Amino acid sequence: MEMDVAALSTSTRIAVIGAGAMGSGIAHVAARAGHTVYLYDMNAEAVARGRDAIGKDLRFLVGKGKLAAAEAEAVLARVIGSSRIEDLADAGLLIEAIVENLEVKQKLFRQLEELAGPQAILATNTSSLSITAMAAVLARPERLAGMHFFNPAPRMALVEIVSGLATDPEVAGTLYDTAKAWGKTPVHASSTPGFIVNRVARPYYAEAQRVLAERAAAPATLDAVLREACGFPMGPFELMDLIGHDVNYAVTNSVFDAYHGDRRYTPSLIQRELVLAGRLGRKSGQGFYDYR
Ligand code: NAD
């Protein structure tokens, strides 16, 4: 594959698939960097909500004096909402941020491979799934890599650029340079379950939920302790509420399965109950805390 290792030029259109918390955040970042961005979701309401969320973030920055009002308007105008997947055909980079499920992502990438141009790069924002497995269903697995942003994407600097066994190093290099051009701090990683951050952070969530199960203290107390005494920017319960319990639970399950049921990664039954109740955290109004 002929591909220069350099950041994608701002004339390259970016497609973001999935307009939830991460997809809208990634679209915000790419549009701020000057790209025209397609924000696609199979659910038209999610597209509208995602675009509204970007507008709200931009207005917040204007209010803080960190962004000119005219620039905020121009950024939002570059985000084109869509619920027709064919609209993404001329994108040079397609970043997937849909549900954390390997089969669903594979099915989407097969579709994207059909409609994207031959030079287009395919990227996934998966938190934990195997890039190698995701790419294995493609005719050209070399053009897929992980581009893993953190929540909230406009504020978090780190981006893990994750290579599967088949990923072309030039593709990973282009994503690395592009993340840098977008003001991020990228790091290369290879495809292991949970990559770097989600692997190392698993015990943080798991142990907190075990402490809660033993009724040592309430979530608010535990969060305050971890924040104030240990210096974490967020306690584990408020962080899981921000991430979304459906997402966090799916990630733990995927890491647990990938390590053949290693007990260190045992998913929490407390979290399973929250997922079953639809208490997904901030996005549903309730999780460990009540946001209604
Ligand atoms: P979310 O639930 O907020 O949004 C997911 C969106 O994808 C929804 O709007 C849904 O309608 C859409 N969707 C689902 N299946 C689709 C399909 N087949 N085609 C098109 N759209 C589809 O989820 P999120 O928190 O934004 O997470 C998305 C991805 O990013 C997951 O892979 C997750 O693991 C990863 N991630 C999440 C976080 C986090 O903190 N939430 C951080 C980093 C990475």
Image (cartoon, rainbow, N blue to C red):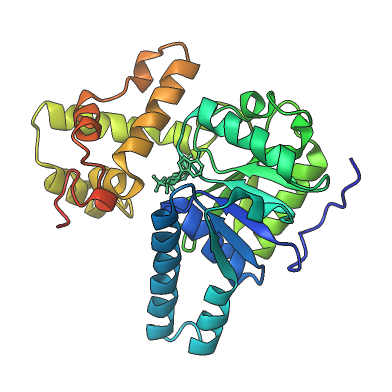
Image quadrant holding the C terminus, namely bottom left
- Name the foreground residue: 117 vs 249: 117
Residue sitting at the far right:
2
- Name the foreground residue: 86 vs 244: 86
Residue drawn at 87 percent across, 52 percent down:
4
Q: Quadrant of ligand 1?
A: top left
Determine whether, in the image, residue 77 is placed left or right of residue 53.
right
Let me know if residue 157 appears in the view.
no
37 shown above or below 235: below
Q: Position of residue 146 (x, y in %)?
A: 62, 40
Let me know if residue 59 appears in the view.
yes
Residue drawn at 29 percent across, 29 percent down:
206
Residue drawn at 43 percent across, 86 percent down:
65
- Name the foreground residue: 267 vs 122: 122
Image quadrant holding the N terminus, namely top right
Residue drawn at 53 percent across, 36 percent down:
196
Determine whether, in the image, residue 65 is placed left or right of residue 96.
left
Q: Position of residue 185 (x, y in %)?
A: 60, 56
Q: Position of residue 187 (x, y in %)?
A: 63, 46
- Number of marks present in the image shown: 0
Q: Quadrant of residue 31?
A: bottom right
290 shown above or below 236: below
Q: Position of residue 275 (x, y in %)?
A: 25, 33
Q: Quadrant of residue 124?
A: top right
